[in-house]
Amino acid sequence: MTDRARGADLVHAAHVVHGGVLLLRPATVAARVGRGAAGGREVAVVRVLGARHVVQGIAGLAGPGRGWPVLGATVDGLHAASMAGVAVLDREHRRAATASALVALAFAVVGGWAGRRG
């Protein structure tokens, strides 16, 4: 197994772990990255995001080939861009959107590295 393949597996596993935390403790996560106690809408959004991370991580671990990390990095890059837009436009959720954008950007960069040829 190459260093990049190991790196890709670590990125996918990190998606599963991160998503699991979001699924299991959504109110805690929402309260920590937001401004105090989270409402039902914020908790639901965190759960949906957690489910996306878990599915993405499992698909990457199960899927063969270099394309999975690149696809995951693309999804993460799009998520980072969308959250940057929310951070600019929605003052109430700026802090949470910025945190989500930074996490997604980190996943995109590392996933892109793991999936590139070399």
Image (tube, rainbow, N blue to C red):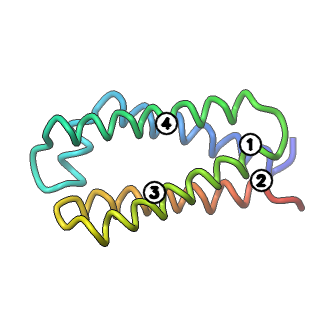
In the image as oriented, which residue stretches furthest toward the left? 37
Q: Residues within 10 Å of mark 1 (few under 14, many from 20)?
A: many
Q: Specify the amino acid type for callout 2.
A: Gly
Q: In this view, does 66 lie to the left or right of 88?
A: right
Q: Are marks 2 and 3 in contact (CB under 8 Å)?
A: no
Question: Considering only vertical position in the picture, is 114 above or below 19?
Answer: below
Residue drawn at point x = 71 percent, y = 47 percent: 69
* Rendered location of residue 97, percent (x, y): 32, 59
Mark 4 sits on what residue? 52
Report, in whole angstroms, how far the alpha carbon at label 4 lies from the one at label 1: 15 Å
Asked which secondary structure carries label 1, the reply is helix
Q: In which quarter of the image is residue 46?
A: top left
Residue 115's disc number: 2
Q: In this view, does 16 lie to the left or right of 7?
A: left
Which is more N-terminal, label 4 or label 2?
Answer: 4
Q: Specify the amino acid type for callout 1.
A: Trp
Report, in whole angstroms, how far the alpha carbon at label 3 lies from the one at label 4: 14 Å
Residue drawn at point x = 54 percent, y = 58 percent: 78
Residue 96's disc number: none
Report, in whole angstroms, how far the alpha carbon at label 3 lies from the one at label 1: 19 Å
Q: Residues within 10 Å of mark 4 (few under 14, many from 20)?
A: some
Mark 3 sits on what residue? 103
Q: In which quarter of the image is residue 94?
A: bottom left
Report, in whole angstroms, how far the alpha carbon at label 2 lies from the one at label 3: 18 Å
Residue drawn at point x = 73 percent, y = 52 percent: 70
Q: Do the residues labelled 2 and 1 touch (CB within 8 Å)?
A: yes
Which is more N-terminal, label 1 or label 2?
Answer: 1
Asked which secondary structure carries label 4, the reply is helix
Which is more N-terminal, label 4 or label 3?
Answer: 4
Question: Considering only vertical position in the picture, is 14 above or below 79?
Answer: above
Of badges 2 and 4, the one in the foreground is 4
Residue drawn at point x = 13 percent, y = 40 percent: 39
